[in-house]
Image (cartoon, rainbow, N blue to C red):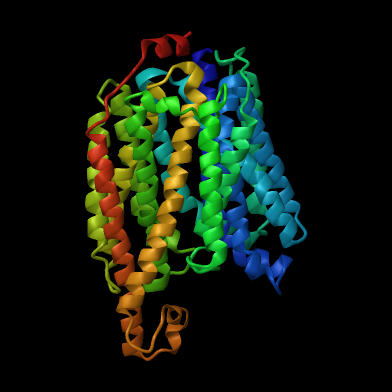
């Protein structure tokens, strides 16, 4: 590919990342308008499935996407994923009831699973070697923008036009990506036809969906000790064991365990799991704190995340550029995780009356740490493998991060409920958070204080998880196989 073609393709990759990140953050702000129009009587009960259906489909498809990339070439799979995402987006915008919208969100999620994974495989081909770190930095920039732009755009389109435009917005952007990618992307990764382990992919998808449903329903819809949750956990274990057995016996496994023999992947993939786990506490529960403890409206909560987004974009871009110029990646990884750990500890001291300035500083520190961490882990994973395994390892890194986030959501939810319940004044319960206005001022202060103590416990737990990840980061051994560099630069 010529330099101009790579530049156009790179712009398309960034546009794809924008689509993926916006879609993760934009739907929540339009939720009430969706319910009012499609199902005012029962829509609230089904509302969580708008998020869940997308997440289940996107995560379940990840292992298969990686193997398809390595078998049929990243370009074909990339175009297919974007096309499926656009079809789902159009159908979502045309939905006439909640059932249709939920089903079409699942279709959109099947394509969305490839937007954040296959896109990074394509980016790795476009920017081989050390320059790939700059792509990871750009990914941090996109993630930072998505944290703020998603809720703001969702509110803007819903208030000014219609909630349907949050889906229609994807169409012109996605079509531009499809046309440009089809015309200018030419990758040297085709012609290797392998057998696809569809049985392994089905087992992985089933186990993943069941695990995410356990996390979604456990402690909320059903008690953790209920027969429903316990039987689902048993199902996850059975399916997980069947999947492991299949990977050990399949001719070409969908997620080969042999990757753990590599000294870099043996550290980087668990590190990705721990990073996802810690992020579930650091980002999601910051939004919960803003809305429940400080009374910040859902749409405005995105504005409070601006310091974090800006710091994430800046640190990710700077570290990526410096690594692309020849600096070692490991010091940035270690420094990033150290900064995240310190930021989590500081956020563990938040109170019911913490000033926006203090919160902004803590969030900026957290964003700076994550900006130096997320793209670098992916860079290390991609640099450790030959070209024929680039798809599997890239999607494996994304898969481990999502599993970590799911585990973190469940773990931190238990911590929140236990610590909040232990700190509540006698005669009150956590449900009183939903009726704070009706409580006496003194009682209201105690209930919010109890809730914040639970949030603080989450941040301290997330700091402990990140400290373990930091210890692992010291064990990373950099690897840049010459064979991969030769293949990618042809």
Position of 137 relative to 262 (above/below): below
Q: How many marks?
A: 0
Task: Give how far across and how far down residue 481 sits, in percent.
Answer: 36, 14
Residue at 68%, 38% in the rendered image: 84
The residue furthest bottom is 440
Q: Can residue 127 be seen? A: yes
Q: Between residues 176 and 251, which one lies in front from this camera angle?
A: 251
Residue at 51%, 48% in the rendered image: 237
The residue furthest right is 96
Residue at 33%, 23% in the rendered image: 324
Task: Give how far across and how far down residue 420 sits, in percent.
Answer: 35, 74
Position of 431 relative to 373 (above/below): below
Position of 225 relative to 211 (above/below): below
Q: Quadrant of the N terminus?
A: top right
Q: Which quadrant of the structure image shows residue 282?
A: bottom left
Q: Between residues 382 and 289, which one lies in front from this camera angle?
A: 382
Q: State left or right for residue 354 relative to residue 44.
A: left
């Amino acid at each position: 590919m010529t330099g101009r073609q790579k530049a156009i393709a790179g712009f398309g990759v960034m546009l794809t990342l924008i689509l993926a990140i916006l879609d993760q953050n934009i739907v929540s702000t339009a939720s009430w308008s969706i319910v009012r129009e499609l199902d005012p009587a029962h829509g609230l009960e089904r509302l969580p499935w708008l998020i869940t259906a997308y997440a289940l489909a996107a995560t379940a498809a990840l292992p298969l996407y990686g193997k398809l990339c390595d078998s049929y070439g990243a370009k074909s799979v990339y175009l297919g994923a974007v096309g499926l995402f656009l079809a789902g987006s159009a159908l979502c915008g045309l939905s006439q009831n909640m059932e249709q919208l939920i089903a079409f969100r699942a279709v959109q999620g099947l394509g969305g699973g490839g937007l954040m994974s296959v896109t990074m495989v394509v980016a790795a081909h476009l920017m081989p070697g050390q320059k790939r770190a700059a792509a990871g930095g750009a990914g941090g920039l996109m993630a930072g923008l998505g944290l703020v732009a998603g809720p703001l755009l969702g509110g803007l389109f819903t208030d000014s036009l219609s909630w349907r435009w949050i889906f229609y917005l994807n169409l012109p952007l996605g079509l531009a990506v499809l046309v440009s990618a089809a015309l200018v992307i030419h990758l040297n990764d085709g012609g290797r036809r392998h057998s696809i382990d569809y049985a392994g992919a089905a087992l992985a998808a089933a186990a993943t969906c069941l695990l995410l449903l356990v996390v979604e329903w456990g402690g909320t819809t059903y008690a953790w000790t209920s027969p429903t949750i316990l039987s689902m956990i048993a199902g996850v274990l059975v399916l997980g064991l069947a999947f492991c057995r299949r990977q050990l016996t399949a001719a070409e496994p969908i997620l080969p365990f042999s990757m753990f023999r590599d000294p870099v992947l043996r550290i980087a993939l668990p590190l990705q799991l721990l990073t996802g786990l810690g992020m579930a506490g650091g980002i999601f529960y910051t939004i919960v704190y803003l809305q429940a403890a400080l009374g910040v409206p859902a749409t405005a909560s995105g504005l409070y995340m601006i310091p974090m987004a800006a710091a994430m974009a800046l640190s990710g871009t700077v570290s990526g550029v410096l690594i692309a110029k020849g600096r070692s990646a490991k010091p940035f990884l270690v420094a990033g995780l150290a900064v995240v750990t310190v930021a989590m500890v500081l956020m563990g001291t938040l109170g019911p009356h913490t000033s926006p300035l203090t919160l902004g500083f803590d969030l900026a520190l957290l964003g700076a740490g994550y900006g130096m961490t997320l793209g670098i882990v992916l860079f290390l994973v991609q640099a450790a493998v030959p070209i024929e395994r680039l798809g599997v390892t890239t999607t494996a890194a994304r898969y481990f991060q999502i599993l970590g986030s799911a585990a973190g959501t469940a773990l931190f939810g238990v911590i929140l409920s236990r610590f909040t319940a232990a700190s509540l004044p006698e005669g009150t319960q956590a449900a009183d958070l939903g009726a704070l206005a009706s409580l006496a001022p003194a009682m209201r202060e105690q209930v919010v204080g109890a809730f914040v103590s639970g949030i603080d416990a989450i941040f301290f737990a997330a700091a402990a998880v990140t400290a373990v990840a930091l210890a692992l980061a010291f064990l990373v051994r950099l690897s840049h196989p010459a064979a991969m560099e030769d293949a990618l630069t042809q």
